Amino acid sequence: MFPESEFKVRRTRVRENLAELDVDALVVTALLNIRYLTGFTGSNGILLLTPSREILFTDPRYTVQSKRETSCRVRTVKGPTLAAVAKAINRLRLRKTGFEYHTIPFHIYTFLNQGLRPGGSLVPTRNLVETLRMIKSPVEIDAIRRAVETNSKAFSKVLPTIRPGLGERRIAADLEYQMRRLGGDGPAFDTIVASGSRAALPHARPTSKSVEANQLLLIDMGTIQDGYTSDMTRTIFLGRPTHKWKKSYQAVLQAQLAAIDAIRDGVPTARPDQKARKVLKSHGLDKAFTHSTGHGLGLEIHEEPRLGKRDRNKLRAGMVVTVEPGIYLEGGGGIRIEDTVLVTPTGCEILTPTGKELTVI
C-alpha cells in the first residue's frame, strides 16, 4: 500500500499542467492512470481534476473499497457514470475540460461531449499522466524490485524441472504458479515459452509441443506484484549446443551488455539500440534483430520510453526500462536476453539478479 502523500504529489503535478494546457479541468478515464493518481484499483472509475477539486466517480460495488483506497472525494453513482461526470462539469461551469486523447474510446468521448452544456467543450490532451509515469518514485522502484525478485525466484524454481518431453504450456503454467506462490499477483503478460524453431517467433505463445533435446528454449516472463511489473527473457539449451549457437549466444550477450553500458541520465533513448545493433552487425546478425532494444515498464508492461532507433526521447534518472536485444533465424531458432534496468544519476542498475551465461541442461 503506497502512502497517500504519494498520490497527492502526483495529482499536484497534474494540476500544475492544467493552466499550461489551457484547460480548466482534466477527465481521467484510463484505469491505470486513475490508479496512479488516486490509488483506486476498481474496474469502474472516472476522475475529475480541477485546480481545487478532485472527484472520483464510481458505482456502488466500490463504495467501501474506494473510500479505503483514496482520499479523493468519492461520488458513488447508481446510473451511468459518464452522465454524472457531465453533470458535474456543467455544475462547476467548466469551459474547457481536457480528456485523454490516446486512451478514451470514441463512444465515451461522444457520450460525454453530448452531455455538456452550451459553451462547454472537450480538449484533447496527450500523454499528460503517462509522461509523469515515466519517472518512478522510490516507492515505485521498490515495488518493481519486488516484482523482479519474485520473477527471478519463480524462474529458478522451475529451471531444474525442465527436461525433454515437457510441454511448452506445462512449463509456462509452472512458471506462473510459482509467481503466485512466491507472492506475485500473477503474470504481467502471457508467458512466452518457445522451443526449437518456434524460438524464432519473438512473441510466440506456448503450445502443446514438447521441448526436445539439442534445441534452444526461449522463456520470456514477467510478474506483476503490488500493481507493478517486471520483465525478463532467458534462452537456454537442452543438450549439447553447437558451435554456431554458442557463438550466436555470445553475440547477443555482448549486444545486451553494450546497450546496458550506454544507459545513463541524459542519454538519447536511441543510443542503447544503436550500440546493440553495432555489436550484432559486427557478427553479421543485425538483420536478424527485428524489434527495438527495450521499453519502459511500471504499472504497464509496455510504457514510455521506448529504446528504438527512431525514438527521440532522453533517458532520465528514475526511469525503469528493459534491455532485450535478440536474433531470430527462421527455421532455426531465436535467442533473446532481457533484463529490467533502472536509470540512475550516474549510470544504471541492473535489477534482474538471474545470471546470463548460456545455461545448458
Image: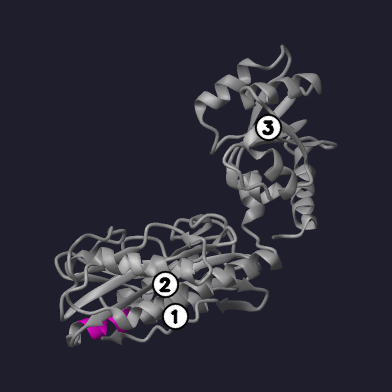
The foreground one among 291 and 207 is 207
Category of crowding for the residue at label 1, using alpha-carbon neighbours closer than 10 angstroms: few (below 14), some (14–19), many (at least 20):
some
Mark positioned earlier in the residue sequence (1 or 3): 3
Q: Position of residue 359 (x, y in %)?
A: 31, 85
**What quarter of the picture does the C terminus occupy?**
bottom left
**What quarter of the picture does the N terminus occupy?**
bottom right
Specify the label residue 257 is tagged with: 1
Mark positioned earlier in the residue sequence (2 or 1): 1
The foreground one among 187 and 238 is 187
Query: What residue appears at the point 61 percent right and 43 percent down from the top-left corner?
Result: 42
Tell me the element at label 2: loop
Category of crowding for the residue at label 3, using alpha-carbon neighbours closer than 10 angstroms: few (below 14), some (14–19), many (at least 20):
many
Q: Amino acid at mark 1?
A: Leu
Q: Position of residue 211 (x, y in %)?
A: 19, 72
Q: Which residues are magenta?
A: 245-251
Q: Are marks 2 and 3 in contact (CB under 8 Å)?
A: no
Q: Which residue is mark 3?
A: 98
Tell me the element at label 1: helix
Category of crowding for the residue at label 2, using alpha-carbon neighbours closer than 10 angstroms: few (below 14), some (14–19), many (at least 20):
many
In the image, which is nearer the foreground, mark 2 or mark 1? Answer: 2
Q: Amino acid at mark 3?
A: Gly
